Image (cartoon, rainbow, N blue to C red):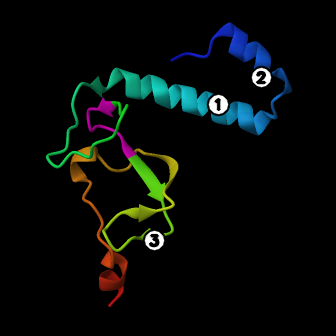
Amino acid sequence: MPVSASVTDLLGGVPAGERAAIRRATRLRTRLDRLERGRSPFADSPRERGAHWTKPQLVAEIGFTEWTDDGKLRHPRFIGLRTDKPAKKVVRERPGDEARKSS
């Protein structure tokens, strides 16, 4: 969804770093809108009210504090999109994966 002229006018008093973040978010939303699909691409789909599903073509780097006991991410945060790895090569990390790699 492109930023409208009225929203752009309001950005005049927003610090440059925040304006850049808004532009990055707008570009990401545009890319995601082009990949939208009606259903989840996952076999075991989470039930999320109001979710917007996309074709699994982009790879995001997600930082997080730790894995929960039930295998979920605690405090996940979007770091950015990765261009060095195709989506088909991504596998889900499991708790302890890093510990096993280093032993």
Judged left or right of residue 63, residue 95 is left
Q: How crowded is mark 3: few (under 14 residues within 10 Å), some or many (20 or more)?
A: few
On the rendered structure, is 60 left or right of 1?
A: left
Where is mark 3, residue-wise? 66
Q: What residue type is labelled 1?
A: Ile
Residue at image mark 2: 11
The answer to which of marks 2 and 3 sits earlier in the sequence is: 2
Q: What element carries label 3?
A: strand
Q: Kindly indicate whether the residue at mark 2 contacts the one at mark 1 (C-beta within 8 angstroms).
A: yes
Taking 99 as reference, is 42 above or below it? above
Q: Is residue 61 left or right of residue 38?
A: right
Q: Distance between the residues labelled 2 and 3?
A: 36 Å
Q: What stretch is highlighted in magenta?
A: 53-59
Q: Furthest-bottom residue in view?
A: 103
Q: Distance between the residues labelled 1 and 3?
A: 28 Å
As for residue 58 lying within the magenta part, the answer is yes
